[in-house]
Image (cartoon, helix red, strand yellow):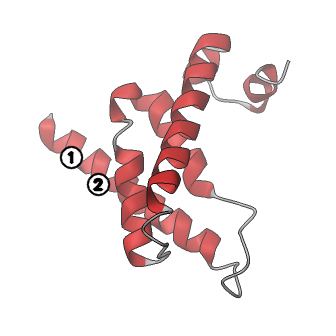
């Protein structure tokens, strides 16, 4: 069981890094930002499917991204870690509170039910 969890955790971190690298490939020069960040959706999906106890993997993955493909000033790093982590955690809490059925059956309809 522990080996499976380690594999899932490692898989998440790798997929998060791939999503970030993909999003960053749309940037031509340092002054630009990307309008898509698939890694955020991956963090939310992980928290919804595997539970809130996996929250710590998001800042770990963000740190890996910033150390490898998206270097940032050291003063910005805590804000990036907090923003990415809190965004996924708060979104997962909102979904769990307002549309818990959406977790078991993720569909377009269940996504729109969150907008009501």
Q: Answer left or right for 15 relative to 90.
A: left
Residue lying at 59% horizontally and 72% vertically, measured from the top left: 22
Please name the residue that numbered disc 1 is placed on. 6
The location of residue 87, given as percent across then percent down, is 58, 39
Q: Can residue 51 be spotted in the picture?
A: no
Rate crowding at label 1 as few (under 14), some (14 to 19) or many (20 or more) other CA atoms within 10 Å. few
Q: Residue at x 39, y 30 (%)?
A: 50
Q: Position of residue 83 (x, y in %)?
A: 55, 46
Q: Residue at x 40, y 50 (%)?
A: 59
Q: Which label was assigned to residue 10?
A: 2
Please report contact status of discs 2 and 1: CB closer than 8 Å, yes or no.
yes
Give 100 or 56, whichever is nearer the viewer.
56
Image quadrant in which you'd find residue 38: bottom right
Residue 79 horizontal/vertical position (percent): 51, 52
Q: Is residue 115 left or right of residue 12?
A: right
Note whether 16 is above or below 82 in the view shown.
Answer: below
The reply to whether residue 82 is visible in this rendering is yes
For the N terminus, which image quadrant?
top left
Q: Could you tell me how far apart the alpha carbons at marks 2 and 1 are, in whole angstroms?
A: 6 Å
User: Label 1's element?
Assistant: helix
Depth check: give the residue in front, 41 or 65.
65
């Amino acid at each position: 069981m522990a080996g499976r969890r380690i594999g899932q955790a490692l898989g998440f971190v790798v997929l998060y890094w791939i999503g970030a690298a993909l999003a960053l490939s749309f940037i031509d020069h340092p002054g630009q930002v990307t309008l898509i960040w698939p890694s955020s959706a991956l963090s939310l999906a992980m928290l919804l499917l595997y539970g809130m106890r996996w929250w710590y993997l998001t800042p770990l993955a963000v740190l890996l991204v910033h150390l490898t493909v998206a270097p940032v000033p050291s003063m910005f790093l805590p804000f990036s870690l907090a923003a990415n982590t809190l965004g996924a955690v708060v979104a997962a809490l909102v979904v769990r509170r307002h549309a818990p059925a959406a977790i078991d059956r993720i569909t377009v309809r269940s996504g729109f039910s969150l907008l009501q």
